[in-house]
Amino acid sequence: MNVKVCKFGGTSMATAKTIKKVASIVRKDKLRRYIVVSAPGKRFKDDLKITDLLYVLADEIIRENVTTTFDVIKERFLTIAKELHVVRPMRVILEETFIKMKQIKTVDFIVSRGEYLSAFLLAKYLKFEFVDAATLIRFKRNTIDFKQTDKVAKKALKNRFDVVIGGFYGTTAEGEIKLLSRGGSDVTGALIASAVKAKEYENWTDVNGFLVCDPKIVSDPKLIESLTYKEMRALSFMGASVIHSDTFYPVAKKGIPIHIRNTFNPRSPGTLIHQMIPGQKHSSPITGIAGLKNFTLIVVEKQFLSEKVGMDRKILSFPEKMDISVAHFPSGTDTFSMLIESKFLIDGKLDILVSQIRKAIKPDLLEVSQNIALISIVGRHLMSDNYNMLRLFTALINDNITIKTIDYGSSGVNIVIGVDGDDYSYAIQSIYKEFFLKGEDE
Ligand code: ASP
């Protein structure tokens, strides 16, 4: 359909002033007919998001120890509503909602009211129709039922335009309200875009888009103007937190581009995420660099390990039994290693895991290195020329950075290296310098 689905995040919905910006963006393009919103977010650095206040309120309601938290939330909404001249309906819906919260008394229901009220407020201001996400987004137990959602939302939104929908929640077939994971309004927007087969999914946030790397590590890194879904997934999986890493599933299937835009700088081109980027050659073979700290590397070495059938599976079965997910498992001749987020190995779990592997495998060597940082170097052109690898490793070696492990992903869009946690920022700076400051014309 020749329409756009626009999702506005918490900072865009934080005050009357920012909501006026949202409205002017919506009104500027006639194709912007489906709007998905987050609950009001932070107005200033140490402010609380409405969602965080709602978690506190949920706890109070469930423990039957209600204090003034609801009044704080109510005041936040009413202050915005007053300035937008929609205070009357807002007052009514706030009172109704509080009564329902005390009746239904589940965390998911109570917390979901942030996006519900936010959507209601914007709909009133825009004079659009408010559509409850509970009528569109389906859950099967605790996870989204993508197929059902597509069907239900498609039917419910047929011939309905100019609507505002709250993100971050949906219902089970039995009508129980369920929350998506934090930041999940991005996924709601993608689900709606897929259901109405939108021409584009615009995700309006408070940054210009994906940057080549973290601006806290490299000052003023370049903006990534376009990337593929796969590259986006690889970057957000490894910590580039512009949008929820699950956002691409619903839209990628239908080839709907995601366009990240900045509500506070609408002139910026933003980042366009597509299936494929036709014919365009990047100035750098790298699209972006992302990374995460605090991993533990466990290396197991045993003679003839590579020749024994099922050995890798056997080693991986130990973390699996302990419900620990393994982020990467690079292997070599007679060695097998696992990279695990250290937070999964606290409270003695590391010792248990290691002793189980020792007992079952009787390795010739078992080495544990903590404080490992992983850096994912992402680029669809990266693997097309071996010279890129030479440049990458030479840059790191010249900057005295020791590479502890490498996972040369078969996806063809990224390579993950592990370095000592203390070298993390230097390694990213080194790669950026090589590929973006000196390699501009390569
Ligand atoms: N308001 C929710 C959060 O803070 C969901 C969202 O913004 O997408 O996580």
Image (tube, rainbow, N blue to C red):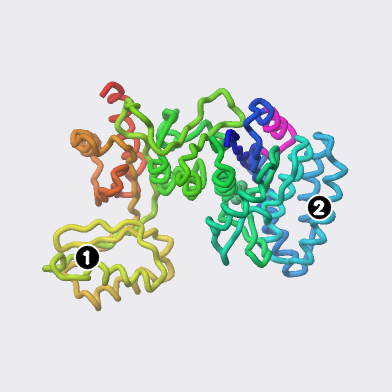
**Image disc number at residue 71:** 2
Above or below, 383 against 149 in this view is above
**Left or right for 401, reference 5:** left
Density class for disc 1 (Cα within 10 Å; few <14, some 14-19, many ≥20) is: many
* Badge 2 amino acid: Asp
Identify the residue position indicated by label 1 in the image: 300
Q: Which secondary structure dominates the residues rendered in magenta? A: helix
Q: Nearer the viewer, residue 57 or 178?
A: 178
* Residue drawn at 64 percent across, 57 percent down: 170
Q: Quadrant location of residue 61? A: bottom right
| Chain part drawn in magenta | 13-24
Image quadrant where one finds the C terminus = top left
Q: Nearer the viewer, residue 270 or 194?
A: 194
* Residue drawn at 55 percent across, 32 percent down: 261
Image quadrant where one finds the N terminus = top right
The residues tagged by marks 1 and 2 sit, at their Cα atoms, a distance apart of 57 Å
Above or below, 316 against 216 in this view is below
* Residue drawn at 30 percent across, 71 percent down: 354
